[in-house]
Each structure stands twice: as structure tokens, then as C-alpha cells.
Image: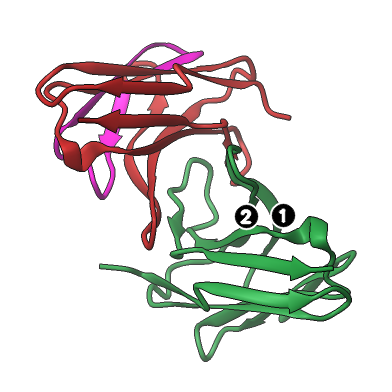
Chain colours: A green, B red
């Protein structure tokens, strides 16, 4: 049972464009929503995270938008660069120490120069 | 980067053989996790540990066992490897916060 659904599976964007990746979750007990970035041959690295008490969080070119009523959240990458080409995973968990993450299926982003 | 070392990084073995993967951390974090990554499935939790000798099952634990005799080491064992266990395995750690930090993975092929 996939509790976090992610789309699209793959995304191709031109340099300077906006990349948007969407996730939807089922478990209303989730209260911590991180995004991870993964390059080939490497482990996932935490990119940005949000808690449901805010609707948006921005760090540089990366923004998370959160819609609690719809149980959806999305990652926006502004001014996308070729170096952003990677696989992105959304995840969800309860915000407690040692809580287990439930991951989406992943999105392979390619930014063309 | 969080101090996490996974070994081996690559392994090829035959069906029916036992396999042990090691995760070593230098952060003295309490929590450690084993995930497997497969196309179309993201990362799925196999087992996790919340302290020395304290472990619990994740969503895909069948066919796997774990042990944690020291804070810094978390071992994942496939008692009798099957081809369905061909995957990339990641170890993660977390401390008092809620974010997890991942190692660079072990690519395991079972022929």
C-alpha cells in the first residue's frame, strides 16, 4: 500500500524553466514532509522540508507548497539548472525522533542546457 | 556530510547464499535504518533500530534480519538470498531531530 503518491515519474525542463513535482498522501497523522535529492551512485540527500503549520517554505530556488485540506504538497524548482538534474523523492512521517519515513516513487528530472 | 559508511559498495552473489551488509556511523546517532530502492517503488523500509539491540520491522522485512550490537554498526543479513532481493540498499541514520541522513548505498545483484 503506497501511502505517498508522486508524479510525474519523469520530467524534462529547459534551463531557466520551472520544475514542479507533486505528491499526495493518505495518512493524516503525517506531520513532516521532506524532499530528498539523489544523484547517480549517491544516497538521497535532504533538500528541504515542511511542517503542516505553514503553506509554503522557500530555500533559495527551491519552494515547497503545502495544501493540508487536499493532502498534497509539491516541490517547485525555479530557474532550473542542468546541475539540478537528479531524482527527487518526496516523503512523509510523523514529526518525532526516530520516526519512519514513507517515500514517494521518485521523479527523474532532466534539465536541458 | 553525515559519517555513514556502507560496505561493500557492490556485491554479486548466487541464489541461496547468505549475504551481510554493513552500515557504520561515526555520528553516535540513536536511530538507524535499512531501505531498499527499486525502480517505481522509491525507498522502502526493511528494518530499523532505535538503540543497541533494539530493532523492529519495516514494510518489506520478509527474508531479512538485522543486528545492532554497537551504536555505530547496523548489519543487514539475507539468510538465503533470492533474485527478488537484487536491489540497491541504503542505510540511514537520525539523531534527536527528525531528518534522516543516508549512506551511498550497496548495489547487490543475486544471480
Between B31 and B80, the one lying in front of the other is B80
**Residue A57 on image: x %, y %:** 78, 71
For label 2, the residue is A36
Q: Which residues are magenta?
A: B54-74
Q: Which mark is drawn over residue A47?
A: 1
Decide: few, some or many residues near mark 1? Use Cα within 10 Å; few <14, some 14-19, many ≥20: some
**Residue B62 on image: x %, y %:** 15, 39
Mark 2 or mark 1, earlier in chain: 2
Visible residue check, residue B29: yes
**Residue A13 on image: x %, y %:** 73, 77
Q: Secondary structure at mark 2?
A: strand
Query: Would you say A96 lies left or right of B37 here?
Result: right
In the displayed structure, A53 sits above or below A110; it is below
Which quadrant does the N terminus of chain A fall into? bottom left
Whether B65 is among the magenta residues is: yes
Residue sitting at 48 percent across and 58 percent down? A93
- Tell me the CA gap for discs 2 and 1: 5 Å
**Residue A21 on image: x %, y %:** 62, 76
Q: Chain of mark 2?
A: A
Q: Secondary structure at mark 1?
A: strand
- Residue A17: image quadrant is bottom right
Q: Which mark is drawn over residue B5?
A: none
Residue sitting at 60 percent across and 44 percent down? A40
Query: Would you say A39 lies left or right of A113 here?
Result: left
In the displayed structure, A34 sits above or below B53; it is below
Q: Chain of mark 1?
A: A
In the displayed structure, B31 sits above or below A31; it is above
Mark 2 and 1 residues: CB-CB less than 8 Å, in contact?
A: yes
Amino acid at each position: 500500500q503506497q501511502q505517498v503518491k508522486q508524479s510525474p515519474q519523469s520530467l524534462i525542463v529547459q534551463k531557466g524553466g520551472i520544475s514542479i513535482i507533486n505528491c499526495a498522501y493518505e495518512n493524516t497523522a503525517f506531520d513532516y514532509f521532506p524532499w530528498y535529492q539523489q544523484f547517480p551512485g549517491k544516497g538521497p540527500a535532504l533538500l528541504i522540508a515542511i511542517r503542516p503549520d505553514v503553506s509554503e517554505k522557500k530555500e533559495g530556488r527551491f519552494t515547497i507548497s503545502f495544501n493540508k485540506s487536499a493532502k498534497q504538497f509539491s516541490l517547485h524548482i525555479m530557474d532550473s539548472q542542468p546541475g539540478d538534474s537528479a531524482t527527487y523523492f518526496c516523503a512523509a512521517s510523523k514529526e518525532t525522533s526516530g520516526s519512519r519515513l514513507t517515500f514517494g516513487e521518485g521523479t527523474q528530472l532532466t534539465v536541458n542546457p | 556530510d553525515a559519517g555513514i559508511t556502507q560496505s561493500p559498495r557492490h556485491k554479486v552473489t548466487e541464489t541461496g547464499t547468505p549475504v551481510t551488509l554493513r552500515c557504520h556511523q561515526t555520528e553516535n546517532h540513536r536511530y538507524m535504518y535499512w531501505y531498499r530502492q527499486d525502480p517505481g517503488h522509491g525507498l522502502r523500509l526493511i528494518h530499523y533500530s532505535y538503540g543497541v539491540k533494539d530493532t523492529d520491522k519495516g514494510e518489506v522485512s520478509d527474508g531479512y534480519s538485522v543486528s545492532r550490537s554497537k551504536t555505530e554498526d547496523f548489519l543487514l543479513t539475507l539468510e538465503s538470498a533470492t533474485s527478488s532481493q537484487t536491489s540497491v540498499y541504503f542505510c540511514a541514520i537520525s539523531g534527536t531531530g527528525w531528518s534522516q541522513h543516508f549512506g551511498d548505498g550497496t548495489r547487490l545483484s543475486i544471480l
